[in-house]
Image (tube, rainbow, N blue to C red):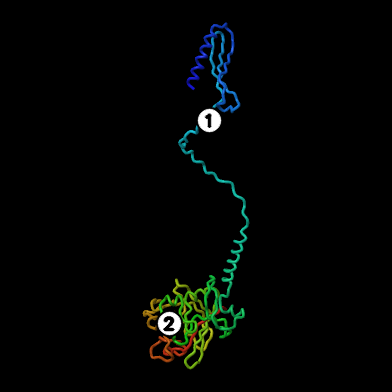
Amino acid sequence: MVDFLSWTFLCCLLLSTIGHHWQSFSSITTIHMGKGKLGACGDTAHCYTQIHTVSLNDKDKLSILQGCPGYPGAQGLKGDAGTPGMKGKVAKGEPGAIGKSADTLLCWCSVITKIFSTANTGAQNCKQLLDAGNTLSGWYMVYSVTGKPVSVFCDMDTDGGGWLVFQRRMDGSVDFFREWTAYKKGFGNKQSEFWLGNDYIHSLTSAGSHELRIDLIDFENASTFAKYASFNVMGETEKYKLILGDFTSGTAGDSLSSQKNMMFSTKDQDNDSSASFCASAYKGGWWYSDCHFSNLNGLYLRGSHESYANGINWRTGKGYNYSYKYCDMKFRPV
């Protein structure tokens, strides 16, 4: 390729020298050199190297014009990566289309709402169960004002029925000389003796007005009772204080009014108004004052006993030295 260009250049000089002796005139000389099939012109094309000599006013100018382009060369090496561009700005997109209504979710919400509504609107006491046609005494489920289910014994026979029983003594099979937590949560046996639990008694008497009835049976199977116009128990922060109405009737006489407005005491919590520890002395959990006229959670001593006032005693009934065979405490709405 170098020899070819050198040869071409010499030819052009020769022509320029010859042309220098020509008369001054404007002219264009074209020389076509070579014939071949190289380059991008294809196999049948004729490609030439063109040399133009231009003469203007005795001054010649040489121009070498490019012929057909050659084939592309080999691909070069990949260049280095450029520097990272500037981080784009974050922009809030357009709001999306409104989705379909959540029929399934609404359905489940309706079911859940119905379940809770059913719980909250279930029977809240034994009187409601009786009015709904449940005439047999036994264990039923009722609901507190907060919707919490509570298993309770309903007396559907005594004095018109509809009584919720929260205490029962009958055979001495359950120990009632217990700590605060036991009386708070409840204890005993559904088939025999039990204490429902101060938390439940409070919850179930916290709404509305309720009357109280106490039934006693001695070991000669003689039955007596006492009734009070109103009854409810405060919460634990008030130490389950007894709120009691007037004595209204009963063959057992009134042995509970002396415990009005008293806090509950147990073997590990002394909340009475006495200088002595009444719960410890009289072996029960009760609304002791200074100390008691009744002690229905005392020891099960089977009738007459020599010890003083520590049995299931009712002062206006058989006094402090007689422990009853059976007793229960119950309330119903009025």
Q: Is residue 210 left or right of residue 241?
A: right
Query: In terms of depth relative to the viewer, which is nearer, 119 or 249?
Result: 119
Q: Height in image: 9 above or below 227?
A: above
Residue 226 lies, in percent from the top left, at 51, 85
For this orientation, the residue located farthest to the left is 276
Asked if the residue under mark 2 is in contact with the one under mark 1, i.e. CB atoms within 8 Å, the reply is no
User: Which corner quadrant of the image does residue 138 belong to?
Assistant: bottom right
For this orientation, the residue located farthest to the bottom is 220
Q: Amino acid at mark 1?
A: Pro
Q: Nearer the viewer, mark 1 or mark 2?
A: 1
Residue beneath the point at 58% across and 15% down: 30
Query: In terms of depth relative to the viewer, which is nearer, 321 or 14?
Result: 14
Query: In terms of depth relative to the viewer, which is nearer, 68 or 93?
Result: 68
Residue beneath the point at 59% across and 64% down: 108
In terms of secondary structure, where does tag 1 sit?
loop
Q: Amino acid at mark 2?
A: Phe
Residue 334 lies, in percent from the top left, at 57, 78
Mark 1, residue position: 72
Residue 116 lies, in percent from the top left, at 57, 68
Mark 2, residue position: 176
In three-dimensional space, the C-alpha distance between marks 1 and 2, rounded to whole angstroms, equals 108 Å
In terms of secondary structure, where does tag 2 sit?
loop
Q: Height in image: 185 above or below 26?
A: below
User: Which corner quadrant of the image does residue 32 belong to?
Assistant: top right
Residue beneath the point at 48% across and 93% down: 220
Label 1: few (<14), some (14–19) or many (≥20) C-alpha neighbours in 10 Å = few
Earlier in the chain: of badge 1 and badge 2, it is: 1
Label 2: few (<14), some (14–19) or many (≥20) C-alpha neighbours in 10 Å = many
Residue 318 lies, in percent from the top left, at 45, 90
Q: Height in image: 105 above or below 214?
A: above
